[in-house]
Amino acid sequence: MKEIASARVLFGCFNTIFFGCGFLKVVCGFLLLSDSRRILLSRLLAMPEDGLYEPPFYYVALALLGAGLIVCTVAAIGVWATYLPGYIILTFYFLIVLGLLLCECAAGVLAAIWLRCYGIQATRGGAVGALQSYYAVPDFEHFTAALDLAQTELQCCGMTSARNYDMSLWQLRRLGPRGMSVPFSCCVQTEHVSYLNPAPVNQSRCQEVQPIPQFRHVHGCQTKLEDWYQEQYFVFMLALFVVAVFKLAILLGTVFSCIQLKKSKQEKHFFTLKSMQNKSNENIYERNVSLHDEPITAKYVQPNNFYSPRVRNPRIFNKPNEMV
């Protein structure tokens, strides 16, 4: 019984930590959902023709919220299942945790191959082709805002260089103001300026053919965007690894609890059978002998004249003048 109690305490500790992981996922989902800049910047990680209504990180935030709520619910079921005598709830709990672990592994694999296989580099013509086809084009305002944000926040211009705008629809269709070679978001900005309303330090010097680093960003955004995504990917994989370790520990704890529960049931059943057999084979004389160190005759003292008629019938022999 002590082993079962210790197993339940250990399993309860794991479930408490597991519940904390679920609550942390919910908090991270809310924080990511409220980070509009990070979500908008992730728009550049998806192909514009994919038809995603929201940026990829928006769906990641919703997935974190949903996964966190599921983990909290499963942890509560695990605490309840620890004190149940059967295996059905524990088996159900084990399968749910195993399914969550497999889903997290699949999410890690998808995050690893996303940028190369499904990201902006997989578009027709790559990232440069996406810029030339969709920047400032109607119905692709979110892509335009995301690229402006990237050029402002990451301090870059174009995907590989500012020359990417030379053959873009933004330039060919004159979608921007006259005399502009690059958007204002490519220029070096004054402090505390929004990407939606850029304010270059010097607009005329920024639009010169030969870029000047003091007035226009020289490096392209593709490499910096990949570095930014690698940072997000590292944080995501680190969190997945920590949660996966706890889930593996919980799976092992579930198996250990099932083994201890089965062992305790077997011991209890064996003890019950043994006690029933002892009661059925019990002899009163053997039981009395076993309870005393001395034989039963040593405790009995027989009167000296027990068989005397006078002692057994005193009324008859106490009459006067009676002949015996």
Image: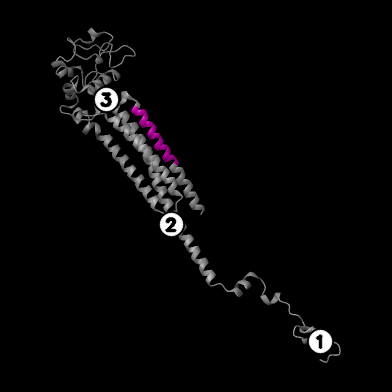
Looking at the picture, which amino acid does disc 3 mark?
Leu
Choose between 174 and 116: the one closer to the eye. 174
Query: Which image quadrant for residue 29?
Result: top left
Q: CA distance from mark 2 to mark 3?
A: 55 Å
Q: Which mark is residue 225?
A: 3
Asked if the residues shown at circle 3 and circle 1 are in contact, with their CB atoms under 8 angstroms apart, the answer is no
Number of the front mark, 3 or 1:
1
Up-down relation of residue 320 to residue 220 (above or below) = below
Asked whether residue 26 is drawn in magenta, I would say yes
The residues colored magenta run 16-33
Choose between 256 and 72: the one closer to the eye. 72
Query: Which image quadrant for residue 259?
Result: bottom left
First along the sequence among labels 2 and 3: 3
Q: Which residue is mark 2?
A: 262
Residue furthest toward the right? 321
Q: Which mark is residue 317?
A: 1
Residue 135 is left or right of residue 293, and the answer is: left
First along the sequence among labels 1 and 2: 2
Question: Alpha-carbon neighbours of circle 1 within 10 Å: few (<14), some, or many (≥20)?
Answer: some
Query: Where is residue 213 shown, x and y percent of the image?
Result: 26, 12
Q: CA distance from mark 3 to mark 1?
A: 128 Å
Secondary structure, mark 1, is: helix
Number of the front mark, 1 or 2:
1
First along the sequence among labels 3 and 1: 3
Q: Of helix, strand and loop, which mostly describes the magenta segment?
A: helix
Choose between 93 and 317: the one closer to the eye. 317
Name the residue located 86 percent from the left edge and 87 percent from the top edge.
320
Looking at the picture, which amino acid does disc 1 mark?
Phe
Asked if one can make out residue 229 in the rendered structure from this viewpoint, the answer is yes
Name the residue located 80 percent from the left edge and 86 percent from the top edge.
316
Secondary structure, mark 2, is: helix
Query: Where is residue 42 shown, x and y percent of the image?
Result: 27, 27
